[in-house]
Image (cartoon, rainbow, N blue to C red):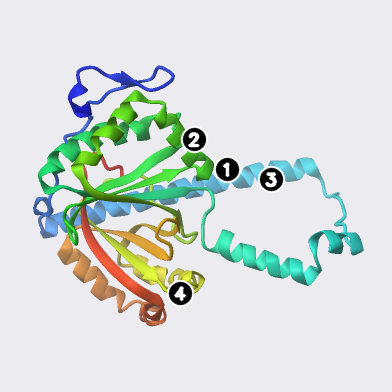
Amino acid sequence: MFASTARHPLRLAGGRALSTTPARSNKLPTLGDITHSPANSATFKSRLQSFRQSLADQKKAASQSSAAYAATLGGASGSSGDAPKGGIVKSILYGSEKGQREEAEMEQSYSKVLARGKYVHAIEIHNVKPEAQKEYVKLVGSVYPEVAADKENNCHLVGSWKTEIGDPDTFVHIWEYQGYAGYHNTLHRLTQSPVHRAFTESLPPLLNARRTDLMQEFSFWPTSPPRSLGGIFELRSYTLHPGNLLEWETHWRAGLAARRNVMEGVGAWFTQVGALNNVHYLWQFQDLRERQVAREKSWGEKGWSGTVHKTVPLIQRMESRILVPLPWSPVS
């Protein structure tokens, strides 16, 4: 098996060494690793507060840098500029002004309102044979962190999790790529790697089934950067009636503020290739008891009950999985 070559690091195309020895333990995690106590809850909240403060500081620094750069450009460019062109030629080439406005509104609805177009996310769902789970974790744990760490790949790993409640033989991995071009470039580069070719041959015998869907993140909910808060995760998946995604986004954009006051989100995505009309939300909690408390508090937040009332009719099917992070998961 590929995982047994740990003493002999292979190399990616271009000569970069790729060790098959994982940096972290590949112990199979379970929900039994999580314990509920006031001390653990306090630790989780403290880590969360520190993480949010760090994000706020980074956002402030980036905003100040952008403002300074814009001021520099403004001083250099002056006030003159080309006058906008109009008339019948523009109407013929680009359509009437009314048509242009309608097209712009439609384009904004789907390109800007729904998604941040910079990234493409892939969700991989592997149904692993029960007797092969330890071997699976060892194999995947020796490859995925290395793929993510290779700066020549146009991707990084958001996280890897094992399902504990729902379908407990299922493992979930979410990747982030630098757009569709980054997705193609990464896959092409991996096909040139003998390590990855060996991995793709070793993986299928461990699985009962697998699927990959390509997604984009909702513009109102950027995917979390790496963090280690501890606890459990809940992946909530919704299949919507066709044609309702924009309405769903509108209601959730308004209702998310209420949820964020009491719950910590990791990301929200909608599928673009694969199982269409699907939406996935990923939340993080200290434990199941804290999840219960947070969800009960949500109903006391202004706007949340209205969001539920308006979105439930849009749903065909919904599913909740309780996940625990795998040892190498960047979000854990």
Frontmost of labels 4 and 1 is 4
Q: Residue at position x 16%, y 34% from top? A: 25
Which numbered tag is attached to residue 65? 1
Question: Sequence order check: which comes first, mark 2 or mark 1?
Answer: 1
Q: Secondary structure at mark 3?
A: helix
**82 relative to 197, above or below:** below
Locate residue 243 relative to residue 88 in the image: left or right: left
Question: Sequence order check: which comes first, mark 3 or mark 2?
Answer: 3
CA gap, disc 3 and disc 2: 36 Å
Q: How many marks?
A: 4
Frontmost of labels 3 and 4 is 4
Q: Secondary structure at mark 4?
A: helix
Residue type at numbered disc 1: Ser
**193 relative to 184, above or below:** above
Residue corresponding to mark 4? 251
Q: Quadrant of residue 96?
A: bottom right
Residue corresponding to mark 2? 185
- Give percent across and percent down for residue 53: 37, 51
Q: Residue at position x 49%, y 39% from top? A: 184
CA gap, disc 2 and disc 1: 31 Å
CA gap, disc 1 and disc 3: 10 Å
Q: Are marks 3 and 4 in contact (CB under 8 Å)?
A: no
Q: Are marks 2 and 1 in contact (CB under 8 Å)?
A: no
Residue corresponding to mark 3? 71
Question: Sequence order check: which comes first, mark 3 or mark 4?
Answer: 3
Residue type at numbered disc 2: Asn
Locate residue 197 relative to residue 242 in the image: left or right: left
- Give percent across and percent down for residue 278: 39, 64
**179 relative to 113, above or below:** above
Q: Are marks 1 and 3 in contact (CB under 8 Å)?
A: no
